Amino acid sequence: MVINLAMLTPAAFGGARWVLRSFRRDSNALAHLDLSKLTEAERKSLKGKQTAEVNAIELRLDKRVPRNAEEGAISVSELPSVDTNQSLVTVVTQSGPANYAVMSRTLRDRLTLMITQHVGNFKVVGRICKVVGDAGEEALAATMVERWGFRSGNILGFSSNPAIASRFGLTNKSGHGLDMLVKVPPPPSITVRAPTTDAMRHHIDGLKGVAPTQTLTFTEETLLVIETKTTLGGTRTPGFNKTQAVGGAQKVTDLMALIRKDRGHWKHSNMLDLDPNALKNADLIAKAQKAGDIQYLHAQIFFDHRGQLNSLVGNGTGIQFNLW
Protein backbone atom coordinates (compact mmCIF):
# COMPACT_ATOMS: atom_id res chain seq x y z
CA MET A 1 0.00 0.00 0.00
CA VAL A 2 1.28 3.49 -0.88
CA ILE A 3 0.45 6.38 1.47
CA ASN A 4 0.52 9.85 -0.02
CA LEU A 5 2.02 11.87 2.84
CA ALA A 6 1.38 15.16 1.06
CA MET A 7 -2.35 14.54 1.06
CA LEU A 8 -2.37 13.20 4.62
CA THR A 9 -0.70 16.26 6.13
CA PRO A 10 -3.77 18.56 6.37
CA ALA A 11 -5.85 15.75 7.90
CA ALA A 12 -3.14 15.09 10.48
CA PHE A 13 -3.31 18.70 11.64
CA GLY A 14 -7.10 18.91 11.74
CA GLY A 15 -7.73 22.28 10.14
CA ALA A 16 -4.69 22.67 7.94
CA ARG A 17 -5.15 23.21 4.24
CA TRP A 18 -3.17 23.24 1.03
CA VAL A 19 -3.20 26.32 -1.20
CA LEU A 20 -1.47 27.16 -4.46
CA ARG A 21 0.84 30.15 -4.11
CA SER A 22 1.48 32.18 -7.27
CA PHE A 23 4.84 33.83 -7.76
CA ARG A 24 5.18 37.58 -7.31
CA ARG A 25 3.94 39.67 -10.19
CA ASP A 26 7.33 41.34 -10.55
CA SER A 27 9.05 37.98 -11.16
CA ASN A 28 8.94 35.53 -14.04
CA ALA A 29 5.82 33.45 -13.45
CA LEU A 30 6.11 31.35 -16.63
CA ALA A 31 8.25 28.29 -17.19
CA HIS A 32 9.04 26.38 -20.40
CA LEU A 33 7.54 22.92 -20.53
CA ASP A 34 9.77 19.93 -21.29
CA LEU A 35 7.52 18.48 -23.96
CA SER A 36 9.85 15.54 -24.54
CA LYS A 37 8.87 14.14 -21.16
CA LEU A 38 5.15 14.18 -21.91
CA THR A 39 3.04 11.52 -23.55
CA GLU A 40 1.24 12.17 -26.81
CA ALA A 41 -2.06 12.56 -24.97
CA GLU A 42 -0.54 15.09 -22.56
CA ARG A 43 0.98 17.11 -25.36
CA LYS A 44 -2.36 17.12 -27.16
CA SER A 45 -4.14 18.45 -24.06
CA LEU A 46 -1.77 21.45 -24.01
CA LYS A 47 -3.16 22.58 -27.37
CA GLY A 48 0.21 23.82 -28.59
CA LYS A 49 1.23 25.65 -25.40
CA GLN A 50 4.94 25.51 -24.63
CA THR A 51 4.94 27.52 -21.37
CA ALA A 52 2.83 27.39 -18.22
CA GLU A 53 2.34 29.47 -15.10
CA VAL A 54 4.33 28.23 -12.11
CA ASN A 55 2.64 27.76 -8.75
CA ALA A 56 4.03 26.37 -5.52
CA ILE A 57 1.99 24.33 -3.07
CA GLU A 58 1.82 25.83 0.42
CA LEU A 59 0.58 24.34 3.70
CA ARG A 60 -1.32 26.66 6.03
CA LEU A 61 -2.23 25.87 9.61
CA ASP A 62 -4.08 27.77 12.34
CA LYS A 63 -3.71 26.37 15.84
CA ARG A 64 -3.91 27.38 19.47
CA VAL A 65 -1.32 25.96 21.84
CA PRO A 66 -3.24 24.50 24.83
CA ARG A 67 -2.78 26.31 28.16
CA ASN A 68 -0.34 28.81 26.73
CA ALA A 69 -1.66 32.36 26.74
CA GLU A 70 1.76 33.75 25.91
CA GLU A 71 1.81 32.18 22.46
CA GLY A 72 -1.96 32.02 22.03
CA ALA A 73 -3.26 31.49 18.50
CA ILE A 74 -0.57 30.51 16.02
CA SER A 75 -0.67 30.75 12.24
CA VAL A 76 1.88 28.71 10.30
CA SER A 77 2.53 28.53 6.59
CA GLU A 78 5.13 26.37 4.86
CA LEU A 79 6.18 27.04 1.28
CA PRO A 80 8.42 24.33 -0.24
CA SER A 81 10.99 25.50 -2.76
CA VAL A 82 10.30 24.31 -6.29
CA ASP A 83 13.98 23.63 -7.01
CA THR A 84 15.81 23.04 -3.68
CA ASN A 85 15.39 20.93 -0.56
CA GLN A 86 14.42 23.95 1.54
CA SER A 87 11.09 25.23 2.74
CA LEU A 88 10.22 28.69 4.02
CA VAL A 89 8.21 28.53 7.24
CA THR A 90 6.39 31.62 8.48
CA VAL A 91 5.11 31.60 12.07
CA VAL A 92 2.85 34.34 13.46
CA THR A 93 2.16 34.47 17.20
CA GLN A 94 0.71 37.13 19.48
CA SER A 95 4.27 38.22 20.20
CA GLY A 96 5.08 38.75 16.54
CA PRO A 97 5.99 37.08 13.22
CA ALA A 98 9.14 35.18 12.26
CA ASN A 99 10.51 33.30 9.28
CA TYR A 100 12.87 30.34 9.30
CA ALA A 101 14.08 27.68 6.87
CA VAL A 102 13.62 23.90 7.04
CA MET A 103 15.97 21.62 5.11
CA SER A 104 15.50 17.94 4.38
CA ARG A 105 16.86 15.44 1.90
CA THR A 106 13.53 14.57 0.33
CA LEU A 107 9.97 15.81 0.28
CA ARG A 108 8.93 12.61 2.02
CA ASP A 109 11.39 13.24 4.87
CA ARG A 110 10.09 16.76 5.32
CA LEU A 111 6.44 15.78 5.34
CA THR A 112 7.10 12.90 7.74
CA LEU A 113 8.84 15.33 10.07
CA MET A 114 5.90 17.71 9.87
CA ILE A 115 3.39 15.00 10.78
CA THR A 116 5.36 13.33 13.58
CA GLN A 117 6.43 16.59 15.20
CA HIS A 118 3.23 18.48 14.45
CA VAL A 119 4.96 21.02 12.22
CA GLY A 120 7.99 20.82 14.50
CA ASN A 121 7.81 24.52 15.21
CA PHE A 122 6.40 24.94 18.71
CA LYS A 123 9.85 25.05 20.31
CA VAL A 124 10.69 27.66 17.71
CA VAL A 125 7.49 29.51 18.62
CA GLY A 126 8.58 29.58 22.25
CA ARG A 127 11.97 30.97 21.25
CA ILE A 128 10.31 33.65 19.12
CA CYS A 129 8.19 34.78 22.07
CA LYS A 130 11.23 34.81 24.37
CA VAL A 131 13.33 36.88 21.99
CA VAL A 132 10.53 39.42 21.54
CA GLY A 133 9.85 39.44 25.30
CA ASP A 134 13.51 40.01 26.16
CA ALA A 135 13.70 42.89 23.69
CA GLY A 136 10.60 44.39 25.29
CA GLU A 137 12.16 44.30 28.76
CA GLU A 138 15.32 46.01 27.49
CA ALA A 139 13.25 48.68 25.74
CA LEU A 140 11.15 49.23 28.86
CA ALA A 141 14.23 49.63 31.07
CA ALA A 142 15.80 52.09 28.63
CA THR A 143 12.60 54.14 28.41
CA MET A 144 12.23 54.23 32.19
CA VAL A 145 15.74 55.67 32.51
CA GLU A 146 15.80 58.00 29.49
CA ARG A 147 12.25 59.37 29.50
CA TRP A 148 10.81 58.88 32.96
CA GLY A 149 13.81 59.60 35.14
CA PHE A 150 14.26 56.24 36.86
CA ARG A 151 17.73 55.54 38.17
CA SER A 152 19.31 52.66 36.26
CA GLY A 153 20.73 51.27 39.51
CA ASN A 154 17.20 50.97 40.89
CA ILE A 155 16.17 48.59 38.08
CA LEU A 156 17.39 45.35 39.62
CA GLY A 157 19.60 43.39 37.24
CA PHE A 158 20.10 46.31 34.83
CA SER A 159 23.42 46.20 32.95
CA SER A 160 24.88 49.33 31.37
CA ASN A 161 27.65 47.25 29.78
CA PRO A 162 26.68 46.20 26.23
CA ALA A 163 28.81 43.06 26.60
CA ILE A 164 26.85 41.90 29.66
CA ALA A 165 23.17 41.02 29.33
CA SER A 166 20.75 42.44 31.87
CA ARG A 167 19.13 39.94 34.22
CA PHE A 168 15.92 41.56 35.29
CA GLY A 169 13.45 40.40 37.91
CA LEU A 170 13.45 37.07 39.70
CA THR A 171 13.11 33.96 37.52
CA ASN A 172 14.15 30.32 37.54
CA LYS A 173 15.87 28.28 34.82
CA SER A 174 12.52 27.63 33.16
CA GLY A 175 11.89 31.36 32.80
CA HIS A 176 9.07 31.39 35.35
CA GLY A 177 8.83 34.11 37.97
CA LEU A 178 8.75 37.92 37.98
CA ASP A 179 9.86 39.91 34.93
CA MET A 180 11.12 43.14 36.50
CA LEU A 181 11.76 44.55 39.99
CA VAL A 182 12.27 48.30 40.33
CA LYS A 183 12.98 50.42 43.37
CA VAL A 184 11.85 54.06 43.47
CA PRO A 185 12.35 57.05 43.42
CA PRO A 186 12.09 58.69 40.98
CA PRO A 187 9.43 59.43 39.83
CA PRO A 188 7.26 60.03 42.92
CA SER A 189 4.10 59.00 41.08
CA ILE A 190 2.90 57.48 37.83
CA THR A 191 -0.47 57.38 36.05
CA VAL A 192 -1.51 53.94 34.88
CA ARG A 193 -4.49 52.38 33.16
CA ALA A 194 -7.11 50.49 35.18
CA PRO A 195 -8.75 48.29 32.50
CA THR A 196 -12.22 46.95 33.18
CA THR A 197 -12.13 44.06 30.68
CA ASP A 198 -9.48 41.65 29.40
CA ALA A 199 -9.88 42.96 25.85
CA MET A 200 -9.33 46.52 27.06
CA ARG A 201 -6.28 45.44 29.06
CA HIS A 202 -4.40 43.64 26.32
CA HIS A 203 -5.07 45.98 23.37
CA ILE A 204 -3.75 49.43 22.53
CA ASP A 205 -5.79 51.89 24.54
CA GLY A 206 -8.83 53.01 22.57
CA LEU A 207 -9.19 49.96 20.34
CA LYS A 208 -11.42 48.15 22.85
CA GLY A 209 -12.53 51.17 24.81
CA VAL A 210 -10.59 53.85 26.66
CA ALA A 211 -9.44 52.55 30.04
CA PRO A 212 -9.93 54.65 33.17
CA THR A 213 -6.70 55.77 34.81
CA GLN A 214 -5.32 55.86 38.33
CA THR A 215 -2.35 57.72 39.76
CA LEU A 216 -0.02 55.71 42.00
CA THR A 217 2.10 57.59 44.54
CA PHE A 218 5.36 56.08 45.76
CA THR A 219 7.64 56.49 48.74
CA GLU A 220 11.42 56.11 48.68
CA GLU A 221 11.00 52.50 49.84
CA THR A 222 8.38 51.41 47.29
CA LEU A 223 9.15 48.30 45.25
CA LEU A 224 7.55 47.93 41.83
CA VAL A 225 6.86 44.41 40.58
CA ILE A 226 6.28 44.53 36.83
CA GLU A 227 4.86 41.87 34.52
CA THR A 228 5.87 42.66 30.92
CA LYS A 229 4.14 41.66 27.68
CA THR A 230 5.50 42.56 24.26
CA THR A 231 4.29 42.39 20.68
CA LEU A 232 6.13 42.96 17.41
CA GLY A 233 3.87 44.71 14.94
CA GLY A 234 0.65 43.85 16.78
CA THR A 235 -2.10 45.89 18.40
CA ARG A 236 -2.53 43.38 21.22
CA THR A 237 0.06 42.00 23.61
CA PRO A 238 -0.04 38.34 24.74
CA GLY A 239 -2.56 37.45 27.43
CA PHE A 240 -1.92 36.28 30.98
CA ASN A 241 -1.35 32.66 31.92
CA LYS A 242 -3.11 31.19 34.96
CA THR A 243 -0.50 32.31 37.48
CA GLN A 244 -0.50 35.87 36.12
CA ALA A 245 -4.27 36.22 35.78
CA VAL A 246 -4.75 36.08 39.57
CA GLY A 247 -3.09 39.49 39.88
CA GLY A 248 0.28 40.71 41.00
CA ALA A 249 -0.25 40.43 44.75
CA GLN A 250 -1.37 36.79 44.62
CA LYS A 251 1.29 35.90 42.06
CA VAL A 252 4.05 37.22 44.36
CA THR A 253 2.56 35.53 47.43
CA ASP A 254 2.46 32.17 45.64
CA LEU A 255 5.99 32.63 44.31
CA MET A 256 7.45 33.49 47.72
CA ALA A 257 5.84 30.35 49.15
CA LEU A 258 7.60 28.25 46.49
CA ILE A 259 10.93 29.91 47.23
CA ARG A 260 10.59 29.20 50.96
CA LYS A 261 10.14 25.48 50.20
CA ASP A 262 13.64 25.45 48.63
CA ARG A 263 12.74 22.70 46.17
CA GLY A 264 12.64 21.95 42.45
CA HIS A 265 13.08 24.91 40.12
CA TRP A 266 13.08 27.22 43.14
CA LYS A 267 15.82 25.38 45.00
CA HIS A 268 18.09 28.11 46.37
CA SER A 269 21.28 26.66 44.90
CA ASN A 270 19.69 26.54 41.45
CA MET A 271 18.50 30.13 41.79
CA LEU A 272 21.99 31.31 42.73
CA ASP A 273 23.52 29.44 39.79
CA LEU A 274 21.28 31.48 37.51
CA ASP A 275 21.53 34.83 39.33
CA PRO A 276 23.91 35.48 42.28
CA ASN A 277 21.50 38.19 43.50
CA ALA A 278 18.38 36.00 43.40
CA LEU A 279 18.03 35.48 47.16
CA LYS A 280 18.77 39.16 47.86
CA ASN A 281 15.96 40.08 45.48
CA ALA A 282 13.63 37.59 47.17
CA ASP A 283 14.49 39.11 50.55
CA LEU A 284 13.76 42.58 49.17
CA ILE A 285 10.32 41.41 48.03
CA ALA A 286 9.59 39.86 51.43
CA LYS A 287 10.48 43.11 53.23
CA ALA A 288 8.34 45.18 50.85
CA GLN A 289 5.40 42.83 51.38
CA LYS A 290 5.75 43.04 55.14
CA ALA A 291 5.92 46.86 55.05
CA GLY A 292 3.00 47.05 52.61
CA ASP A 293 5.11 49.27 50.35
CA ILE A 294 4.86 47.32 47.09
CA GLN A 295 3.01 48.03 43.84
CA TYR A 296 2.16 45.66 40.98
CA LEU A 297 2.17 46.81 37.36
CA HIS A 298 1.46 45.21 33.99
CA ALA A 299 3.60 46.83 31.29
CA GLN A 300 2.81 46.47 27.58
CA ILE A 301 5.54 47.14 25.04
CA PHE A 302 4.44 47.71 21.45
CA PHE A 303 7.04 47.47 18.68
CA ASP A 304 6.08 48.38 15.13
CA HIS A 305 6.89 46.15 12.14
CA ARG A 306 10.36 47.70 11.88
CA GLY A 307 11.21 46.78 15.46
CA GLN A 308 10.94 50.36 16.74
CA LEU A 309 8.78 51.36 19.69
CA ASN A 310 5.35 52.32 18.32
CA SER A 311 5.11 56.11 18.57
CA LEU A 312 1.31 55.93 18.34
CA VAL A 313 1.08 54.26 21.75
CA GLY A 314 1.58 55.65 25.24
CA ASN A 315 2.10 59.31 24.33
CA GLY A 316 4.86 58.38 21.92
CA THR A 317 6.69 55.92 24.21
CA GLY A 318 5.27 52.70 22.75
CA ILE A 319 4.54 51.54 26.32
CA GLN A 320 1.36 51.22 28.38
CA PHE A 321 1.25 50.67 32.13
CA ASN A 322 -1.72 48.98 33.78
CA LEU A 323 -2.65 48.01 37.30
CA TRP A 324 -1.87 44.35 37.86
Image (cartoon, rainbow, N blue to C red):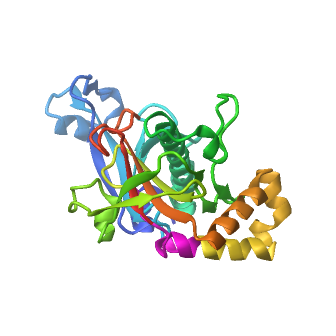
Q: Is residue 78 visible?
A: yes
Q: Residue at x 67, y 58 (%)?
A: 171
Q: Residue at x 29, y 66 (%)?
A: 199
How many numbered marks, from 0 up? Answer: 0
Left or right of 279 in this view: 130: left
Judge whether residue 95 is colored magenta: no
**Where does the image place residue 244, in percent across and percent down from the top left?**
51, 69
Left or right of 146 in this view: 289: right
Depth check: 154 or 256 in front?
154
**Compared to 131, does 265 lie above or below?**
below
- Residue range of the region highlighted in magenta in the rendering: 237-251
Judge whether residue 238 is colored magenta: yes
Left or right of 272 in this view: 4: left
**Where does the image place residue 161, in percent across and percent down from the top left?**
67, 29
**Compared to 293, does 229 lie above or below?**
above
**Where does the image place residue 118, in percent across and percent down from the top left?**
52, 61
Q: Residue at x 71, y 57 (%)?
A: 281
Depth check: 38 or 230 in front?
230
Q: Quadrant of residue 7?
A: bottom left
Q: Is residue 73 visible?
A: no
Kindly give the residue lying farthest to the left in the view shown: 47
Q: Residue at x 57, y 60 (%)?
A: 117
**Compared to 124, does 49 lie above or below?**
above
Left or right of 30 in this view: 145: right
Q: Quadrant of the C terminus?
A: bottom left
Depth check: 218 or 300 in front?
218
Kindly give the residue lying farthest to the right in the view shown: 269
**Where does the image place residue 248, in percent across and percent down from the top left?**
52, 69
